[in-house]
Image (cartoon, rainbow, N blue to C red):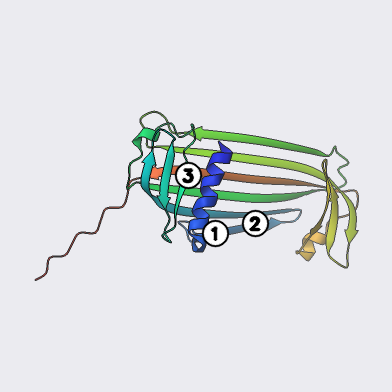
Amino acid sequence: MRKTLLSIAVALAAAAPAAHGQVPSGAAAVKASEPGRVTVADAVQVAATVQAIDKAKRLVTLKGPQGNVFVVEAGPEVRNFDQIKVGDQVVARYVEALSLELKKGSGGIRERVEREVGAAAKPGERPGAAAGRRVTVVADVVAVDAARQSIRLRGVERTIDLKVKDRNQFALIKVGDQVEATFTEAIALSVEPAPAAPKAVPKK
C-alpha cells in the first residue's frame, strides 16, 4: 500500500512543484524544541483532476494544477475504485516528522524498529486510502565535535555524523549518551467531488 500511495504523491508533487508545502493552514513546517528533544514536521498537499480511467488495469490519468498529465495505479486498497469518475479530484496529503530525544547516560541497547499501518475507505464511502510508517532508532553517541558542533551516532545498521544547529541542545550531549530518533511519514489519498463550475453572469 505505501509503495503505491507514495508513488502517487511523488507524481502529484512533480506535476505541481510550486505546491510543495501547501497545506490548508498555510504553514508547511512546524518545529518544537525543548531541552533534550527536537521535533520537526512538514506537510504537502497537492490536488489533480481525473482525466481518464482504465478500470480493467485500475489506471487513472490525472492532470495536475500545472497542466501536467500523468498516469497512476489505484492499488487494491482503494476499495471503491468503481466510484471514481472523470472530473473527480484526487487529493494527496503527505506528512513527515522527525523527533530526536536525548537519553542521558542511557547505556541501553541499540535498536531499530519499523512499523507500517494502513487504512482504506469502507464499502459505500468515497474512494480513499491511507498508509503510514514509523521508524524508531536508538543510537549511541560515540563522539562529540565541538568545533563542528556535530555528534557521531552509532546505530544498529550504520554510523552517521549529525550536525546539531542549536547550541543549547548541543551542550547537553556527551559521549556515552544515547539518542532516540523517530521518523514518521503518512500519506492519504482521497477522491473528492470536482468543484462546481462558476455560473455565468448574465449580461445586462
| Residue placed furthest toward the top | 123
Secondary structure, mark 1, is loop
Residue 82: image x %, image y %?
36, 33
| Viewer-nearest of discs 1 and 2 | 1
- The x and y percentages for residue 111 are 80, 38
Q: Residue at x 89, y 62 (%)?
A: 145
Circles 1, 2 touching at the beta carbon (< 8 Å): no
User: Which badge, 2 or 3, comes first in the chain's sequence?
Assistant: 2
Amino acid type at image mark 1: Ala
Residue on which the image places disc 1: 28
Q: Which residue is mark 3?
A: 72
Q: Earlier in the sequence, mark 1 or mark 3?
A: 1
Which quadrant of the figure contains the N terminus? top right
* For residue 187, side relative to residue 203 (left or right): right
Question: Mark 3: few, some, or many residues within 10 Å (few <14, many ≥20)?
Answer: some
Q: CA distance from mark 1 to mark 2?
A: 14 Å
Camera-near label (1 vs 3) is 3
Count residues near mark 2 (Cα–Cα under 10 Å), then give few for <14, some for 14-19, many for 20+: few
In the displayed structure, 164 sits above or below 157; it is below
Nearest the eye: 136 or 11:
11
Instruction: Give the residue number, with chain letter if any, for mark 2.
Output: 32
Amino acid type at image mark 3: Val
Picture residue at 78% right of the left edge, 61% below the top? 164
182 relative position to 61: left or right: right
